[in-house]
Image: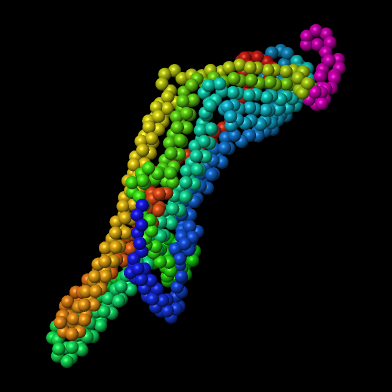
Amino acid sequence: MKTFSCPARVVALFMGVITVLSATGASAQSDGRETLQLTLDEAVRRAVENNPDLAGVRFSTQIESARVSESESAYTPVFSTTVGASSIVTPPSNFLLGENGVDTKDLFSSTGVRQRLAWGGGTWNLSGDTSRTSSDNPLTSFDPSLQSGFQFAFSQPLLKDRKMDLARQQTIVSRRNLETAELRVRESVVQTTAAVKQAYWTLKATLANVMVQQRSLELAQELARQNKARVDVGQTPPLDLLQAEAEVAQRRENLIRANTSAGDAEDRLRRLIMDPADVSFWRMRIHPSDEPIVGGVLPDVDTIAADGFAGRYDLARARKDLENIATTVDFFNDQKLPDVRLETAFRSNGLGGTRFLRSGGFPGTVVGTVNRGYGSVLGDMFGSTYPAWSVGLTVNYSLGRSYEEAGLARAQMERRQATQRIASLQLQIAETLRQAARQVHSTAQRIEAARAGETVARQRLDVEQRRYEVGLSTSFLVTQAQRDLLQTEVNLLQATLDHQSALVSFEALQQAPPLGAGEVEPRGSNIVALPISAPQGLFRAGATGF
């Protein structure tokens, strides 16, 4: 690791900005505009709180959280109930039904709860029904008749859907995508913070450039004043004065451009940190009060590739994406198995109402009635007087290449593709981090070189100025020395800004990629509503009992 010392000239140059900003603040107060004394930490805090782009990214976590709730709704118990009445007149299809047929009236209700289980893929159904039937059928034994019953049924997959069904696949993926969205928010905070720091130091540098251009203009104006005095007394030709005045005009134009650049830089920072609801913030001047930290320990380029991946949020998101694909592979591996299910059910019934007592041959003569109330019906039902149960297996299997097998082949290819994408991303991260570290080194060296050039240019200007005052130099050479000093001061400012930008980039790249540079977006997690089936058990067709 190398240590880079802070050039005193650089700090002095940036400290000089305070003078310019103080004058700017005084003029701002005169026209009613306020000046905001802004530290770097305060700028970052304002951006994290107010930046609308960052706020938009935060909504992704709420969206994914809602998708998790959507996926988990597949396990929510479903309550259903039915209440109705019916009247059916049956045509007289035999002589026992009379000439007018049979009129049957029903009042009935059915209530049930069913649920899909989060483990094992099973579903259960608990239901109960009751009815009151009146009929003029001469063969009926009850009029009216009261019937009631309850049923519990359970369906358990034994192969397909046992380890992974669509409901569990959606839930796992949606929860993982929520984690991915949270990583994306952290990544965006890092990127926004880096953008704010870049904008902050750019504004600081542009304001320092205004000061440099202003000082250069003052030097040119002083030289023009001296030339005018010499022309007035006949010591120099008028051409020297014209040359000096042309240089004043050129440097005044440079100052105007520097002020414009400073205004643009101020707006870029303002755009990142301002509250969109605060319109007055656009009229406020920003004074970046912090000074750049130049120097310190430089990063070791050779060790970056070994440990430069642990904190990268985009790599973590890519790995979450790979895990989602692996879950899809597991899902299709399960789905291509035969659909074998264990079906069980138990039902208990009760019967009551007004029962006819008959005597004689078929169909007999009604000689009396016996009433069995609803309490007796419930007693039959809960006492299992008329039980019915079933247990069995169902088997379904696709003949030929199924949809699930084709989906498995596609998911396996996507998993291999995602694995290679992660390997490529790791190489890219190592490359960009090493480049950023070299930028930190090179910009630190540029500062040292620019400082040396600025020192030499300043000494040369002092020499030429003294030579000019005693008549040993010309206005052209003084002007050229002033231009050289201006250029070296601008070079020093640019090298310092580039060094700050390199430090900010290197710090941010250890956690997140640059904005818009090959971002790994989370895979979609559209949730499909999954109805819950109501198992009824297995009974032979035509068998009585329900």
Residue 78: give x, y in percent of width and height: 63, 34
Q: Which residues are magenta?
A: 353-379
Relative to 319, say whether 2 is above or below: below
What residue is drawn where x is 62% and y is 31%? 115
In the image, 54 versus 432, the foreground residue is 432
- State the image coordinates of residue 518 (x, y, percent, origin top left): 36, 46
- Give the number of callouts: 0
Please, which residue is most extreme toward the bottom here? 233
Residue 134 seen in the current view? no
x%, y% of residue 143? 78, 22
Q: On the image, which quarter does residue 308 sit in?
A: top left
Residue farthest toward the right in the current orientation of the protein: 368
Q: Residue furthest top?
A: 361
Up-down relation of residue 43 to residue 259 (above or below): above
Which of the 4 quarters of the picture holds residue 368? top right
Residue 33 horizontal side relative to residue 363, left or right: left
Give the quarter of the figure containing the C terminus.
top right
Q: Nearer the viewer, residue 447 or 232?
A: 447
| Image spot of residue 430 (x, y percent) | 35, 45
Residue at x 43%, y 39% (from the top left corner): 319
In this orientation, does residue 228 appear?
yes
- In front here: 203 or 343? 203
| Residue at the spot 36% in from the left edge and 38% down from the top edge | 423
Q: Nearer the viewer, residue 474 or 312?
A: 474
Please give the name of the residue rendered at 43% of the width and 56% of the height, measured from the top-left corner: 193
Q: Is residue 369 magenta?
A: yes
What sort of colour scheme is used for the picture? rainbow
Q: Is residue 235 magenta?
A: no
